[in-house]
Amino acid sequence: MKISSIEKLINWYKKNKRELPWRDTNNPYDVWLSEIMLQQTRIEAVIPKFLLFKKELPTIEDLSKCDDDHLMRLWEGLGYYSRARNLKKCANVLVKEYDGKLPSTYHELIHLPGIGPYTAGAIASIAFNEKVTAIDGNVLRIIARIYGIKDDILSTSTKTKIKELLEPFYVSIKSPKDLNQAWMELGQRICLPNGLPECKKCPLNKECYTYKNQLFDEIPYRHALKSRKVIHRTILIIRDHTRFVLHKRPSSGVLANLYEFVGVDEILNRKEVLEKVEALGFSANHIKKLPSSKHIFTHLEWHMDAYEIQVSQIKELKDSSYILKTKKELENFAIPSAFKTYVEYYALRD
Ligand code: SF4
């Protein structure tokens, strides 16, 4: 690829870029927050969450002071909750060591909690115009297609090769900020990951190996991903007349420290459900089967059966990892999206 193609790409970006709430605000916090939210999440889903987050926590200092439940509530629906915890952890470091601001160089950013090479590159270039790459799945796919790279796109050696191909361009351009956003825009709108890319509209189509040779099925190449582990669960929605029982998950592993409807990692029949409920110290009056559901995490799938168990009025909870919440209280409570089916079933959200 020639430097003139890179300039063409930057010009294409300047003419075609979408207005996004975090774009061109000159606020490094916006770049950081949006980049973390956009990991594994579509732009359309991020926009309202970003706006709400910024309204409630307009500064890094506000984020550092935010209590965990409020933070989880603001993050609800985006999934991968460890990202939110790392944001707060990082905000604490920034308040303590950097006067509540993000540092301006890649080498400082990369040492902060939750900031990896891609995010450090994105913040350093977009917020501070440092001449560094920000290589994510979009860039890997585009460059593999342009250069006809047929090696596994996810291997470290391919990633290194792509970084080495790109770095010389950054030395000569004036606006790494625009170039990195141009790759993102091109990957999200033209050089699409699934289905046919829109090559006719692509500013780089003249020198794209994959387009010239129509090799869309072969490039980018990925080794088959390992299949996900499937866990069969039974969800027990235990409630008395006014409140639901929730359980705090362990401090490590999937959905660490978040509250969920009570559940066990096995399929139980009605009799076993009732035995389990009694063992937890509740007196069951009525049991009802609820819709089954499925939730997919990166490396894991939960296949869930569910029951509602109406119990006699709960006077006390013996175990502090259980809490009681009314339906009204649950409307403002972060329940992970893995339980979306049941949140919707009980109309706990709009
Ligand atoms: S020409 Fe097509 S395949 Fe090549 S970079 Fe552009 S959109 Fe992607």
Image (tube, grey):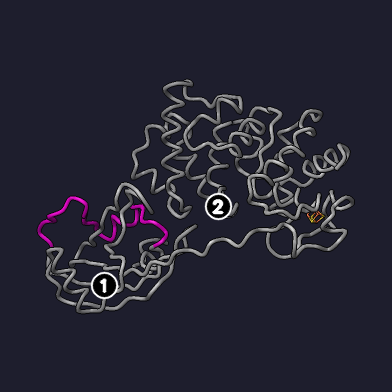
Q: Which mark is residue 308?
A: 1
Quadrant assignment for the C terminus: bottom left
Quadrant assignment for the N terminus: top right
Q: Quadrant of ligand 1?
A: bottom right
Give the SS element for disc 2: loop
Write down the residue under mark 2: 40
| Residue 124 locus on image (x, y percent) | 63, 30
Residue 183 location, quadrant: top right
Foreground disc of the pair 1, 2: 2
* Amino acid type of the residue that numbered disc 2 sits on in the rendered structure: Gln
Q: Is residue 214 magenta?
A: no
Marks 1 & 2, CB-CB < 8 Å contact:
no
Q: Is residue 159 left or right of residue 317?
A: right
Look at the numbered disc 1 and say if its residue's Cβ is closer than 8 Å to ligand 1.
Answer: no
Q: Nearer the viewer, residue 129 or 331?
A: 129
* Amino acid type of the residue that numbered disc 1 sits on in the rendered structure: Glu
Residue under the image location 29 percent in, 50 percent down: 250
| Residue 73 locus on image (x, y percent) | 39, 49
